[in-house]
Amino acid sequence: MSKRPDPKNWASWKPFGIGEQKPNNYLELWKAFRSVKGNRRYAWRILTQGTCDGCALGTKGMRDWTMGEIHLCNIRLRLLELNTMPALDVALLRDVSALPKRSGELRALGRLPYPMIRRQGEAGFARIGWDEALDLAAARLGGKVGVYLTSRGVPNENYFAAQKAVRAIGVNSIDNAARICHSPSTVALKQAIGAAATTCSYQDWIGSDLIVFIGSNPSNNQPVAMKYLYHAKKAGTKIAMLNAYREPGMERYWVPSNAESALFGTKITDHFFGVNIGGDIGFLNGVLKHLAENDWLDKTFIDTHTAGFDAVRDSVAAQSWESLEALSGATRQDMFELAKLLGEAKSAVLVWSMGITQHAYGEENVRAIVNLALARGFVGRDNCGLMPIRGHSGVQGGAEMGAYATGLPGGLPVTPENAAKFEELWGFEIPTTPGLTATDMIDAAHAGDLDVLISSGGNFLEVLPDPGYCREALSRPGLRVHIDIVLSSQMLVPGAGDVLLLPAQTRYEMAGGVTETSTERRIIYSPEVQGRRIGEAWPEWKIFTELAARTRPDLADLIRYPGGTAAIREDIERSVPFYAGIAGLSKFGDNVQYGGRHLCADGLFPTPDHRGHFAAVDLPELQRPDGSFLVATRRGKQFNSMVHERRDGFNGATRQAVLISGYDADRLGLADGAEVTLTSPTGSFTGNVLRAPLMPGNLQIHWPEGNVLLDKARRSPDARIPDYNAYATLDPS
C-alpha cells in the first residue's frame, strides 16, 4: 500500500474542505474538551486506558488491531461527558412534573447516585436504601417478569450474570438490544454458515478487491471505519454501496487524524446502486441471477463447501426481470453492473446493517446477501467475508452471553436438551422454553400480563414503534425497575404500582475490569479507570445477582460472585467454549479473537455437515397503497437514541427533516423547508422538506422521532424484530 498522496482519491482541492457541507471534526474535539471541564484528567484516562464504549470496532485505549494509527471518533468523544459527569441533585426528583421531557435534557442533569422509589400515586421519587429496594423488588419477582438490557456500553460480565440470575428466578424472559438491530442476522447466519457473527476481520477490508455496503452507513455509525476505508482505497479497493439514499458521508469523507484525508478529503464510494426501501431482495436476487447466467460462479467452492445451490439457482431463474425491477426500483443493467463487479473480483467483503435487518423480512434480506457470498466463495479467506457490522460495543456479546429470550449462552437455542446442559453446569433448573422477547414484553405489559418489567438502560419510548402504545404498556405492570446511570423519559411514566430507580456504574468504574466483544469477535479487556465515583452506584452484574439471591435464597451461593468480575469471566469460559481465553484477560490490552482472523476458514463451516447452506429467497409482496410513499427511519448526529445535535453535519438535515427526492419534490411543487405532514395508519409526523439524493417514491425521517408512523405489529417471523419502515401519505401542512 502506497503512503504517497493520491490525488485521484481526493474529495476536494479545497484545504480541509472549507465551505463544504460536512461535519467539523475539530469542533467536535473542542466540544468534548469543554464538556468534561473539571474532569479532564479522568476523561483522558478513559480515552487512553479504557476500551471504547461507543461502536463495536474495538480499542485498547486509542489504538486498535487494524492499523497503527490513532483510533478516536466523535461518538466516543460525545460519550465522555456521560462517563465523567457528577451526580444529579436528587431533590429534583421529588416532583417529576417539573423535569424536562426530552431524554437529552434529563441526561444532562447528572448521574443517578442513589436508589430511588416512586410509589403509586406519588408526584415523584424519594431516596431509599439498597436493602429496602432489593427486598421490595425480590418480593415481586415470583410472578411474570420481563428483563431488558440495552447495549450502551454493557460489558459481557453484566450480560452473563444477568441472564444467569434471571434464569435462576425461573424465566427465560431476558432480552437485549440485539433483538432490535441484528437479530435477523443471527437467525440467518446461524442457519446458513453455523455462526452468528462476522466471518472476517477489519484488516480484511484493506486490500480486498471490493467492499459492498448494503443498507449500512459507517460514516454516521462507525466513524473510525472511514479511516479503514481510506487505507483500503489507497490499497486499490473498490467500494460499492446499495441503498435508497446516496449518503453524503459515504460519498466523501475527511478523516481528521490523517493528514492527506484531513486536507483534501477522500472519495469513498466508487459505485452506487439505488434501491427502494425494502427492495433489497429484488436487487440481490437479480445480481445472483446475473452471476448464474454469466457463469460468474466459484463452482469449485460451491461443489466442495456448500449445499442447496441448485434450488436457489432455479428459484432466481423463475423470478422475472420485470418483478425484480419493480420491487427494487433499479434496472436489470444496474444489477448486472454489481454482478460484474462481484464476478470479476477475486476477493470481496459484504457489509450490512439496520437498512437490511429492520424489516418484517429481515432474515430473508440477510439470506440473499449470504447467497451472493457463497456463490463467489467469499468466505473463510483473506480479504473476504460476511460482516453484519455492529453499531454498539455491547451488542455482539449480549446474545453470546445468553441475555436473549430465545438463546442460551453460546447462542444455543432454548430447548430441553440445552437447558439440561446448563442445569448440570450451574446446579439449578433452567426453563426449557423461550421467554418473551423485548417486543413481546411490551405486548404483555400492555395486556396486563406482566407483573414486573426490569429495564437496564434503554428507553422503550424512544426505541420501539408506536410510542403511545409503549407509554400505555409501561404504565401497567405492578412494578417497574429501571437500572441506569442517568435519567430517561421512560422512568417518569406513572406506574400502576411502584417504580424503582437503581443507580449503575459505567464500565470504567467496575472493580476488576470488564470485557466487550467487538464486531470482529475480539474479546477485549477494559480495566477499571481511576476517577470520580458516583454515590452508591453498583455494577449491574451485582444488582441482578443480588435480586436473584434474595428471590431464591436457596440458590444464593450458586448465583452470587464473591470473586467479582474475574469469577464471572471464569464462569463464562466454562459456559461458552468458544470464549476460551476470556478468563485469562486481566490487564490493559489483553484480548482474544475467538475463531481467529476468519470463521469458516478454508470453507469449513461449523454446521452439522460442515457446509455453507444456500437458501431460496422469495420476493416479498409489498402492496404500496396508491399515492403513498415508502418511509424509512434514519440516524443523524446521534448514538443509538441519544441525539447529540439537532442538525446532521453531513446533509444539514434537522431532526424534523423529511428527506425527499428532487423528482418527487418537483412533482408535488414542494420547496426546501416546506412544512408537510406524513400520515400512516398508526400516526402522523409533521416536518420540513429537504431535497436529497433519494430514490423517487421513498422518504426518510429521523429515528426515534419517526417511530410514531410505525406499525407495532409488523415484525419479522423468526427474529421478532420490528419493521422500522412504513407506508405514508404526504400532504402540505
Image (cartoon, rainbow, N blue to C red):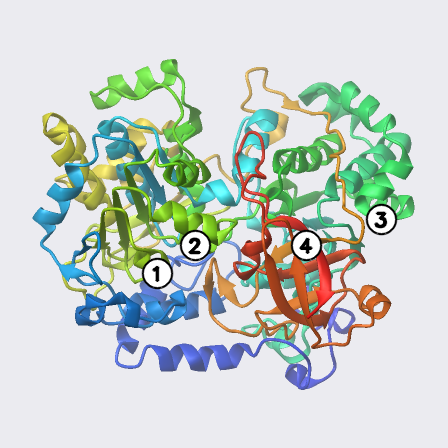
Q: Nearer the viewer, mark 2 or mark 3?
A: 2
Q: How far across and how far down the image is residue 4, in percent?
A: 69, 71
For label 2, the residue is 461
Question: Which residue is drawn at the image coordinates 91% and 46% (left, top)?
Answer: 333
Q: Position of residue 439 (x, y in %)?
A: 46, 40
Of the pair 696 and 686, the residue shown nearer to us = 686
Write down the residue under mark 1: 488
Q: Give the alpha-carbon distance from disc 2 to disc 4, as whole Å.
A: 20 Å
Q: Nearer the viewer, residue 232 or 355?
A: 355
Q: Amino acid at mark 4?
A: Val
Amino acid tagged 3: Ala
SS at circle 4: strand
Relative vertical location of residue 275 with respect to residue 706 in this rendering, above or below: above
Q: Which mark is residue 330?
A: 3
First in residue order: circle 4 vs circle 1: 1
Mark 2 to mark 3 CA distance (whole Å): 36 Å
The type of residue carrying mark 2 is: Leu
Q: Earlier in the sequence, mark 1 or mark 3?
A: 3
- Asked if the residue under mark 2 is in contact with the one under mark 1, i.e. CB atoms within 8 Å, the reply is yes
Kindly identify the residue that appears in the image at 23 percent across and 68 percent down: 95
- Distance of mark 1 from mark 3, alpha carbons? 42 Å
Mark 1 closeness class: few <14, some 14–19, many ≥20 residues within 10 Å = many
Q: Image point 40% across, 34% down: which residue?
A: 404
- Mark nearest the camera among 4 and 3 is 4
Local SS, label 2: helix
Q: What is the distance, in whole Å, between disc 1 and disc 2 at their CAs? A: 9 Å
Q: Quadrant of residue 35?
A: bottom left
Q: Residue furthest front?
A: 121
SS of the residue under disc 3 = loop
